[in-house]
Image (cartoon, rainbow, N blue to C red):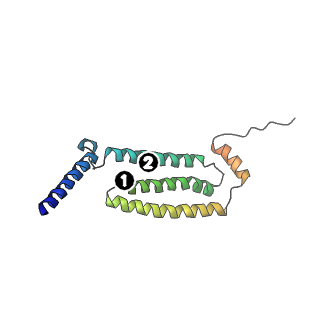
Amino acid sequence: MMRTLQLAVFGLFTIGSAAHATETPRPSTINAAGIAATDMKAFSEAMDRSMARMHEGMAAAKPTGDPDRDFATMMIPHHQGAVEMAEIQLRFGREERLRRLAQGIIVEQRQEIAVMQAILDEKPATPANAAGASASAHGHHDHKEMKR
């Protein structure tokens, strides 16, 4: 009876080990840091998406002629990008010091986003400033027809 139990356990262990071996990436697909190629691809794609969102958000910020407002409007997507990248680091990274740094970035950047958003909420943009600032910020000049 004991021998049968031992053989059954050994059989399950062997089957489990064989199944695990087929699931483990081949050594050639593991990089020097011990990261599987599929994980590295997912990491790179997530970082690329995060940076694209950040750049789009910063570019979408229209100048208003108010440096405080313009700064906050561009920095919010920049900080949000930092939060997203830190979250990606936590998902894929292994270096404990970088993981702690990423956690700190998430907390601090979210707090700074909240401060900047509160300032923007307190001081809405004025349409007159936004139209004039947009043209001058992009190197355009208003050419008005002269009335005769």
On the picture, is 29 further left or further right than 101? left
Camera-nearest residue between 32 and 122: 32
Which residue matches tag 1? 92
Residue 2 visible in the snapshot: yes
Vertical comparison of 106 with 31: above or below: below
Q: Position of residue 98 (x, y in %)?
A: 35, 58
Camera-nearest residue between 7 and 21: 7
What secondary structure is found at the residue carrying circle 1?
Answer: helix
Camera-nearest residue between 21 and 48: 21
Report the residue at 63% width, 49% height from top: 63
Which residue matches tag 2? 46
Question: In the image as oriented, which residue stretches furthest toward the left?
Answer: 3
Report the residue at 56% width, 49% height from top: 57
On the picture, is 124 further left or further right than 9? right
On the picture, is 111 further left or further right than 23? right
Question: In the image as oriented, which residue stretches furthest toward the front?
Answer: 1
Q: CA distance from mark 1 to mark 2?
A: 10 Å
Q: Position of residue 136 (x, y in %)?
A: 66, 44
Question: In the image as oriented, which residue stretches furthest toward the right?
Answer: 148
Q: Are marks 1 and 2 in contact (CB under 8 Å)?
A: yes
